[in-house]
Image (cartoon, grey):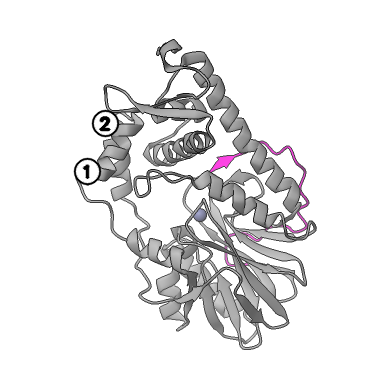
Amino acid sequence: MTRLPARVVLDYPFTAPASDGSVVEVAPGILWARMPMPMALDHINVYLLRGDEGWTLVDTGLNTDTGRARWEHIAATHLQGLPIVRLVCTHMHYDHAGLASWLCERFDIPLYMTLGEYFMMRALSQPEPDPLPPSQALFYQRAGMPQERIDRMWRAMRQDPFMPPQPRSFNRLRGGDEIQLGARLWRVVIGEGHSPEHACLYCEQDQILIAGDQLLPRISSNVLVTGIEPEANPLQLWLESLTRLEQLAPDTLVLPSHERVFRGLHARTQELREHHTQQFDLLRARLQEHGACTAFEAMLCLFPRLRGPVDDMLALGESIAHLSWMRYDGMLRREIDEDGHYRFRLADVPAAQKINH
Ligand SMILES: [Zn+2]
């Protein structure tokens, strides 16, 4: 995720809870808590929704002992004598679903997810084989990333300390589904691009959106192309999803998965669109100045301050997502050079006139 300079002033009506199991009530029967994360982005927000028969949890935090202890504390302290009755995971990323298996067993509750998220989570529960299968290896070779940097990236991915156990069953959520929790009716609004079938929950009557990673106040969510679907155009799906969110009421109280609860939905979607336009402009300027480039070279242009192999993975995927969007839009052409790398060049410049530096 990229932290953006805060240009648009959003309204933050609440002070965030500490990541110690305390909660903030953001509307009657809606509690906001934070789970700690041992990384630069040091927390994830989780929400508890009170219904007639008990609490619905939204998202889980990472699969860590600390996370489990925080949930035990919340369950013992803040539930007003009601049980936990279900878990909803907005999407499969393991800061959101890492404790799904544990929570479902610990509190004997069902898991609700979309089909796309549940099965992507199951599919990614095993680390990639070593060496990488040919289709995966080819994806990184085409990107022009040096082999030692690819190896370093996959070594880090295979040592992932947070790989959670997988819940073995789920209840399917679909876009447009409605869930009645107490006096509130929540509608499932699907977002795409950050993950395959991300569920947001919207309460029209109270104008509250549980946004997951689909709308964050200060960071831009990762939108990646990976070797799983090398020809995907997730940025198009992401921008279309922003359009769907723009149909919601302007005064909507947005409950995001990171940073603070805010108002200013339309200002924020506009700012995110501008961020991606700036990335396109940077790439166009790079191509105008230096001629064709690989995805790896585009990554070094868009993300000059990468701090390690996990950053590499995210930055490369995000760079390809921008290149792919420009290619599908007709701005860029893609060809394979003699080294087997894809090279991208501006579509309005004939190949013969370009000089590769
Ligand atoms: Zn996510």
Residue 11 lies in the magenta-colored region: yes
Q: In this picture, is 317 found above or below 32?
A: above
Instruction: Kindly identify the residue that appears in the image at 73 percent across and 55 percent down.
Output: 262
Outermost residue, left direction?
131
Residue 230 spot, x, y in % from top left? 37, 44
Instruction: Kindly identify the residue that appears in the image at 26 percent across and 31 percent down.
Output: 147
Determine whether the residue tagged by mark 2 lies in a helix, strand or loop. helix
Few, some or many residues within 10 Å of mark 1 (<14, 14–19, 20+): few
Whether residue 78 appears in this view of the structure is: no
- Residue span colored magenta: 1-23
Q: In this picture, is 161 found above or below 55?
A: above
Determine whether the residue tagged by mark 1 lies in a helix, strand or loop. helix
Residue type at mark 2 is Glu
Q: Quadrant of the C terminus?
A: top left
Residue 20 lies in the magenta-colored region: yes
Residue 46 spot, x, y in % from top left? 58, 65
Describe residue 198's horizontal placement relative to residue 119 as left or right. right
Instruction: Kindly identify the residue that appears in the image at 59 percent across and 27 percent down.
Output: 281
Residue 306 spot, x, y in % from top left? 45, 32
Q: In this picture, is 204 found above or below 84?
A: above
Circles 1 and 2: CB atoms closer than 8 Å: no
Residue type at mark 1 is Pro
* Residue in front for this viewpoint, 299 or 40: 299
Residue linked to disc 2: 148
Mostly what secondary structure, the magenta segment?
loop
Instruction: Kindly identify the residue that appears in the image at 39 percent across and 40 percent down.
Output: 313
Dividing the picture into quadrants, the one containing residue 177 is bottom right
Dividing the picture into quadrants, the one containing residue 180 is bottom right
Residue linked to disc 1: 134
Q: Earlier in the sequence, mark 1 or mark 2?
A: 1
